[in-house]
Image (cartoon, rainbow, N blue to C red):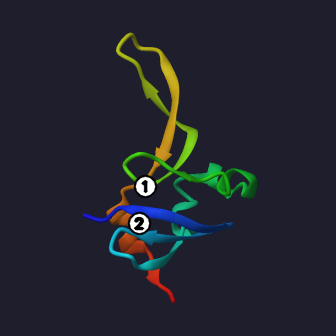
Amino acid sequence: MHFINSIISIQPYTITVIFDNKERRLINFEPLLLDFPVLKKPEVFIAATLDDYPTIKWEGLAKMKELDGTIIPAPLDFSPDMLYLMSIGIN
């Protein structure tokens, strides 16, 4: 299991991070843009932060249903293991 310790830089459509194993890695999100078109907007993409899991998230870009059926905004996030597999190591 991998976790993201910190975000080093965010550029449309890549994010450089440091994982829990101290590896510095570049994540290219372009393959995900077809499934998550809201991330195509540079001003949205660069608003990425770390959540408590810790992994990368975008606040309010997903939706979830409350127990009473109310739909509310939720963070859009991705498995840190998936992000690790998508990424490449950099120096």
Q: Is residue 48 left or right of residue 52?
A: right
Residue 56, percent from left and from top: 49, 55
Residue 73, percent from left and from top: 54, 29
The residue under the point 52% across, 68% down is 31
| Secondary structure of the residue carrying numbered label 2 | helix
The residue under the point 73% across, 58% down is 42
Residue in the foreground of this view, choosing between 10 and 8: 8
Residue 67, percent from left and from top: 35, 15
Q: How many marks?
A: 2
Q: Is residue 8 above or below residue 33?
A: below
Q: Who comes first in sequence, dot 1 or dot 2?
A: 1
Task: Name the front one of labels 1 and 2.
Answer: 1
The residue labelled by disc 1 is 55
The residue labelled by disc 2 is 83
The residue under the point 64% across, 49% down is 38
Residue 14 numbered tag: none
Q: Is residue 60 left or right of residue 44?
A: left
Which residue type carries mark 1?
A: Thr
Which residue type carries mark 2?
A: Leu
Q: Residue furthest left?
A: 1
Image quadrant containing the N terminus? bottom left
Q: Is residue 91 above or below residue 3?
A: below
- For disc 2, the neighbor class at 10 Å (few under 14, some 14 to 19, many from 20) is many
